[in-house]
Image (tube, rainbow, N blue to C red):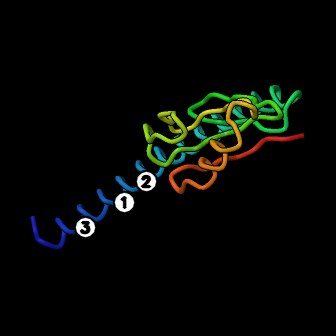
Amino acid sequence: MSAKSTATQNAKAGTADTEATGGVVEHLVEKFDEVMDAEAKAAKAQAVSSQVVLLSKGHARSVPNDSLIIVCREPGFRRAGIAHPAVKVYAADRFDAEQLAMLVAEPMLEVIGVQE
C-alpha cells in the first residue's frame, strides 16, 4: 500500500471518528437540555410560595422569604461559631447582629438575604 493511499484512508477514518463523536456530543446536549427542562419545571412548581429557588445536582429547593443563604468558598471554613458547608440556608434570625456583621465582612463567605 502506498503512502498516499494510507494517508487517504487515515483522513477518511478521522472524518468518521469526528462524525461519530459529533453524534455523541449532540446526544449529550439533548440529554442536558431535558434535565434542565425537568429542573426548571420542578423549580417553577416549588416557586409558588417563594421567590427564590436553588437548583443543584438535579434537585430544586425553595427558599422561604426572610432567609439567609450562605455560600462558603472553602467548605468547612469556620466563622461565627459554625463550620460552613458549601451552601446552607438559615432563618434570618439565626445570627445576632455581631455574628451577621462578621459573616458579611468575611471574604470566604457570600451572604445572600432573601426578602419579599
Q: Position of residue 94 (x, y in %)?
A: 69, 30
Rendered residue at 82%/26% (across/down): 45
Residue kind at label 2, given as amino acid type: Glu
Q: Position of residue 101 (x, y in %)?
A: 66, 49
Residue kind at label 3, given as amino acid type: Thr
Q: Earlier in the sequence, mark 3 or mark 2?
A: 3
Residue kind at label 1, given as amino acid type: Thr
Q: Mark 1 near mark 2, Cβ–Cβ under 8 Å?
A: yes
Which residue in the structure is indicated by mark 2?
A: 19
* 18 over 89 or under it: above or below: below
Give the alpha-carbon distance from disc 1 to disc 2, as whole Å.
6 Å
Give the foreground label among 3 and 2: 2
Residue 116: quarter of image: top right
Q: Position of residue 46 (x, y in %)?
A: 80, 26
Most extreme residue toward the front is: 98
Give the alpha-carbon distance from disc 3 to disc 2, as whole Å.
17 Å
Say which of 113 and 93 sits in front.
Answer: 93
Which residue in the structure is indicated by mark 1?
A: 15
